[in-house]
Image (cartoon, rainbow, N blue to C red):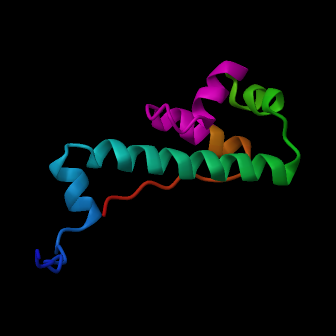
Amino acid sequence: MATKRKAGVSEETFDDFLASQGMLESCEDRAIKEIIAEQLAAAMAEQGITKMEMAARMKTSRRQLDRLLDPSIPSVTLDTLRRAASAVGRRLRVELM
């Protein structure tokens, strides 16, 4: 009869695992973008702003706004984020940790 081994508990964090797989930065980028997109969408809903109106306030196209709100598209400029924040009456704050 085979004896069962008790599994050891790893000290590795999920961030350590993602880093070892070369995925940490892309996962963090997507998470940040998802948070920003959710905050913008919530502010738009709270104020009753349509996507067409939001795009007009940002002086951009609806298509560009859709890319901004899509968390799977991580690239976005600070200028775009600043214009989006301003369009919903908010300020953009960026900090290094």
Q: Residue at x 44, y 44 (%)?
A: 30
The quadrant the C terminus occupies is: bottom left
The magenta stretch spans residue 67: yes
| Quarter occupied by the N terminus | bottom left
Q: Is residue 47 left or right of residue 97?
A: right
**Which segment did they paint magenta?**
61-83
Please determine whether, in this image, residue 20 is positioned above or below residue 79.
below
What percent of the width, then of the height, locates residue 34?
Answer: 54, 47
Q: Position of residue 78 (x, y in %)?
A: 47, 38
Name the residue located 39 percent from the left edge and 44 percent from the top edge: 29
Q: Residue furthest front?
A: 1
Residue 60 vs 76, above or below: the answer is: above
Q: Residue at x 15, y 78 (%)?
A: 4
> Which of the two residues, 6 or 69, is positioned nearer the viewer here?
6
Find residue 20 and report its horizontal and vertical position in percent. Answer: 15, 51
Q: Residue furthest right?
A: 48
Closest to the observer, 94 or 76: 76
Q: Overall secondary structure of the magenta stretch?
A: helix
Where does the image place residue 55, in percent across and percent down from the top left? 73, 27
Residue 8: name its quadrant.
Answer: bottom left
- Figure check: 51 above or below 11: above
**Frontmost residue, 67 versus 13:** 13
